[in-house]
């Protein structure tokens, strides 16, 4: 009986030793996996969009590419985006970042004459949105309308002081003719643009936030001159 008891405890001890060794190995592997994951997360490039670096505090690598041409309906022009990609943070940084798909300029190309025109002279701004306006409202999927001009939502100043252009900076609403000429700003210092929409053959509606007030603004088409403006009342929480 004593011999069987001793053998039982020896087997139990061996089992516990093996189990403890296995648990230790698993724990070490888990620690190594977590450490490697944290290290990778800290050192991998961070992907961001709609951010253009304009400060000199970091080494920035720039790459430029042209987007897919888009036909401007009813005109001999196509619109091509100039896309700016940036890598920054330096090779020794724990948090290298890359900003892709930043539209910084627009190329208007006349396919009849092959003449080209840039919307801006350089790439020092960020185009958040562009909206084409037409000579009439759309009546069907195959309705061949003619574009008469563009609205743009643009960031051209680093208003929050972080040495970057992003949607956190103040926005500007601007317009041009359908060929990209006559660029002019309509509104500066916008905090957020909610919508830019053609609502009639001769009117466009812009909803935006400025000075913490939501504003409804109508513009004429095709002249894109300001018409009526209304501050939308705030609603209660209950």
Image (cartoon, helix red, strand yellow):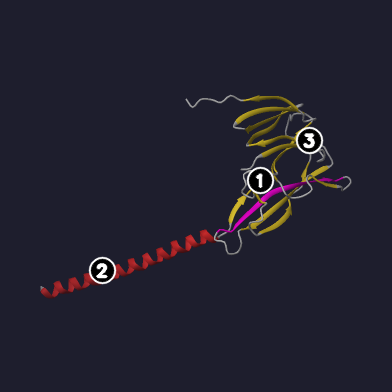
**Mark 3 neighbour class, 10 Å CA radius: few under 14, some 14 to 19, many 20 or more:** many
- Look at the numbered discs 1 and 3 and tell me whether their residues touch, using CB distance below 8 Å: no
Residue 28 sits in quarter: bottom left
Q: Secondary structure at mark 2?
A: helix
Q: Which residue is mark 1?
A: 158
Q: Secondary structure at mark 1?
A: loop
- Residue 11 screen position, x and y as percent: 22, 72
User: Looking at the image, which is closer to me, 38 or 89?
Assistant: 89
- Residue 237 screen position, x and y as percent: 49, 27
Name the chief secondary structure element in magenta.
strand
Counting residues from the start of the chain, the first of labels 3 and 2 encountered is 2
User: Looking at the image, which is closer to me, 236 or 189?
Assistant: 189
Magenta segment: 95-111
Q: Tell me, for residue 232, which label it has, or none.
A: none
Magenta stretch holds residue 105:
yes
- Residue 140 screen position, x and y as percent: 73, 31
Mark 2 or mark 1, whichever is nearer to me: 1
Above or below, 129 against 61 in this view is above
Mark 1 or mark 3, whichever is nearer to me: 1
- For the image, the number of numbered tags is 3
Q: Residue at x 77, y 50 (%)?
A: 122
Q: Secondary structure at mark 3?
A: strand
Q: Residue at x 60, y 59 (%)?
A: 89
Q: Which residue is mark 2?
A: 16
Q: Tell me, for residue 149, which label it has, or none.
A: 3
User: Looking at the image, which is closer to me, 97 or 196?
Assistant: 97
Counting residues from the start of the chain, the first of labels 2 and 1 encountered is 2
């Amino acid at each position: 009986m004593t011999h069987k008891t001793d053998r039982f405890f020896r087997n139990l001890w061996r089992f516990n030793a093996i189990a403890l060794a296995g648990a230790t190995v698993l724990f070490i592997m888990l620690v190594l996996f977590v450490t490697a994951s944290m290290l990778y997360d800290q050192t991998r490039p961070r992907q961001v969009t709609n951010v253009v670096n304009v400060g000199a505090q970091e080494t920035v690598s720039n790459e430029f590419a042209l987007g897919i041409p888009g036909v401007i309906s009813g005109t001999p022009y196509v619109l091509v985006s100039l896309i700016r990609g940036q890598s920054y943070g330096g090779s020794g940084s724990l948090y290298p970042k890359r900003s892709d798909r930043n539209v910084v300029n627009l190329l208007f190309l006349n396919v009849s004459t092959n003449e080209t025109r840039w919307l801006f002279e350089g790439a020092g701004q960020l185009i958040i949105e562009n909206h084409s306006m037409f000579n009439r409202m759309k009546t069907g999927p195959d309705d061949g309308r003619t574009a008469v001009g563009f609205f743009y939502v643009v960031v051209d100043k680093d208003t929050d002081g972080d040495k970057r252009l992003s949607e956190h900076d103040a926005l500007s609403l601007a317009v041009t003719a359908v060929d990209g000429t006559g660029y002019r700003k309509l509104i500066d210092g916008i905090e957020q643009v909610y919508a830019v929409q053609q609502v009639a053959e001769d009117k466009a509606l812009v909803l935006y936030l400025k000075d913490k007030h939501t504003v409804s603004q109508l513009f004429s088409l095709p002249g894109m001159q300001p018409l009526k403006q209304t501050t939308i009342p705030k609603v209660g929480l209950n």
